[in-house]
Image (spheres, rainbow, N blue to C red):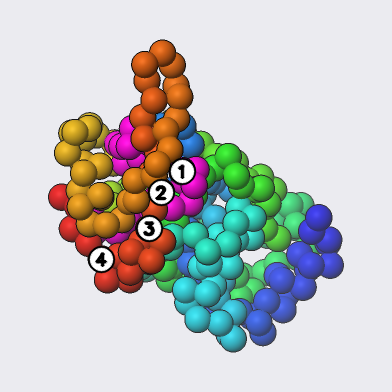
Amino acid sequence: MVRQEQIEDFILNGHKEYIPHVSLDCAIFGYHEQQLKLLLIKHKAIDGWCLPGGYIKRTEKLVEAAARNVRERTGIDNLFLQQFKTFGDPNRARFEEFDEERWYEATGVRVTRDNWLIDQTISIGFYSITDFSRTTLQPDVMSVECEWFDIDALPPLEFDHDEMVQEALHTMRIHLYHYPIGYNMLPEKFTLTEIHALYETLLGKKLDISNFPKKLIALGLLTKLDEKRSIGPHRSPHLYKFDKERYDEALKNGVVLS
């Protein structure tokens, strides 16, 4: 539970630990049983929903800050994480609408326009993917809610986060053809139908069920096991698992799945 002292210290002294005017926002996509969701948060002094984000500590690398942000929101470490775009349009955060009294009511801290948080900020976008059923959601010091939303039923987002989500989704779907995404979103052992459903859901379109999994096998990313899963009379498909060494190599160097 976030204490009032933590909120006050972050607002008044956060610039000593974090780099001012440069932030990051994370589009965290969640997959489970052919559902695709997006993680959103609601800030203390803002009505609407937005992407989880935060500032970069002066002592950490950019990707470390993004990984920390994702881990703190989801409770899961070492997720697939990719930078997708930087956003820096003037007034993208609409600070001209800043209301000192509302901030005080929401945070309990008096904030004026010369505070380090109330200024034009460049944001670096990252996206990540996880199994949303395995997450333990936790708001950050400046938010009050943290919730999964269906990708096709998102509320209007604050700031320029609608644009961020579209850019993140577009980039993620391109990357699906070049990186083996899926290690953290399937059971250790899975059927070809399950991995086919994963890719169809993430891409938002139909794939040839007879050809697409074969490409993963041909690239050596999947290993066929001497085990089957009984799912009904006369239906016992073979189980597969990722070849972790090949998978990690493909994440590093890329592959071509299309």
Quadrant position of residue 244: bottom left
Q: Distance between the Cα atoms at labels 2 and 3?
A: 7 Å
User: Horizontal and vertical percent for residue 169?
Assistant: 33, 48
Counting residues from the start of the chain, the first of labels 4 and 2 encountered is: 2
* Residue shown at 72% from the left, 79% from the top: 13
Mark 4, residue position: 254
Check the image and report above or below for 193 versus 254.
above
Residue 229 visible in the shown view: yes
Which element carries disc 3, helix, strand or loop? loop
Check the image and report above or below for 214 versus 101.
above
Residue 82 visible in the shown view: no
Check the image and report above or below for 64 versus 126.
below
Mark 1, residue position: 189
Q: Assess whether residue 84 is covered by the magenta stretch.
A: no
Over which residues does the magenta segment extend? Answer: 177-201
Residue depth check, mark 4 versus mark 2: number of the one nearer the observer: 2
Which element carries disc 1, helix, strand or loop? loop
Residue toward you, 33 or 102: 33
Which element carries disc 2, helix, strand or loop? strand
Mark 2, residue position: 241
Is the C-beta separation of discs 2 and 1 under 8 Å? Answer: yes
